[in-house]
Image (cartoon, grey):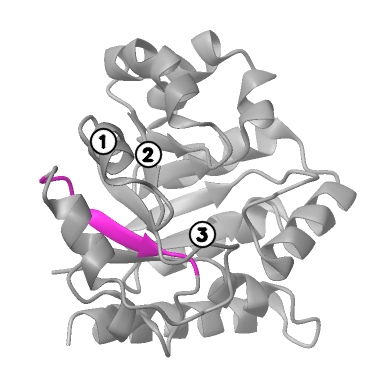
Amino acid sequence: MKNLVAYITTSYPEKSFSIDLALALGENGVDTLELGVPFSDPVADGPLIEKANHKALELGFKFEHLLDVSKEIASNLDTLWMGYFNSFYQQDMQKLIPLAKSIGVNGLIIPDLPHEEAKLYDALFSENSMANISFVAPTDSEDRIKEVVSSAQKFIYMVAYTGITGSGKAEDLQPFLNSIKKYTQTPIYVGFGVNQKTAKDKVKGADGVIVGSAFIDVLLKDDLNYTQKIKECSDIAKIIKDEINS
């Protein structure tokens, strides 16, 4: 069974909605949830997620909202925090990682933290049985892929192409997948540009997909109420889960 990871922007449009949406996604095929930490300059994300980040900040997002949502969902759904390093660093990593674990969070995804700097926190993550998700990209050399994936935990975030999330650009991922698999048994999940139309193709040879913009696109629709947004996101999750396992 191939896994589906879903990204949502925490507290957009509000905290209680994030809780309801997360639990609904867990009931409709999502295996792991990325709770996105709104940030002013989300450099690895496309325009939809960037817009949701800015809207959440405008609506008053605070870091404690992330903690509150996590407390409500982590016992029911495998939960990760996805955010930019400054958001976590400001909370003091030595205190934050144990706190996250105590809430039930299983790992962090930090796209702007280089592998070399991430290694400084290896012991901290290990002591708390938390994963710091590793990224690999098509631009990485063979030696770098070997280095990055050798200590990868939980899953490897395979960037489907060089760019930002949400584009859906087509690429032949098999050579890239093969180069990763030579050095690891850790599951490989394909992210960037994955949606209902591309998921079946992108998951070939991989162990799962990571989907964000397809859900955020729904959350940004002003003509839908909360119930309709949750239903549409749940339908998308079911379709993608079926597609990647058919």
Q: Position of residue 26 (x, y in %)?
A: 37, 63
Locate residue 98 relative to residue 11 in the image: left or right: left
Write down the residue under mark 2: 133
Write down the residue under mark 3: 7
- Residue count near mark 2 (Cα–Cα under 10 Å), binned few <14, some 14–19, many ≥20: many
Real-space CA distance between mark 1 and mark 2, rounded to the nearest whole angstrom: 7 Å
Q: Nearer the viewer, residue 29 or 42?
A: 42
Q: Residue at x 57, y 65 (%)?
A: 165
Amino acid, disc 2: Ile
Label 1 or label 3, whichever comes before in sequence order = 3
Q: Nearer the viewer, residue 13 or 47?
A: 47
Q: Position of residue 153 (x, y in %)?
A: 25, 36
Can residue 3 be spotted in the picture?
Answer: no
Q: Residue at x 39, y 78 (%)?
A: 171
Task: Find residue 152 and name its label.
Answer: 1
Task: Judge whether 175 appears above or below 43 on screen.
Answer: below
Label 1 or label 2, whichever comes before in sequence order = 2
Q: Kindly report which numbered mark, 1 or 3, lies closer to the viewer in this rendering.
A: 1
Q: Find residue 143 and report its image quarter.
A: top left
Amino acid, disc 1: Ala
Locate residue 128 relative to residue 41 in the image: left or right: left
Amino acid, disc 3: Tyr
Element type where label 2 sits in the image: loop
In magenta, the rendered stretch is 185-192
Q: Residue at x 42, y 90 (%)?
A: 197
Quadrant location, the C terminus: bottom left
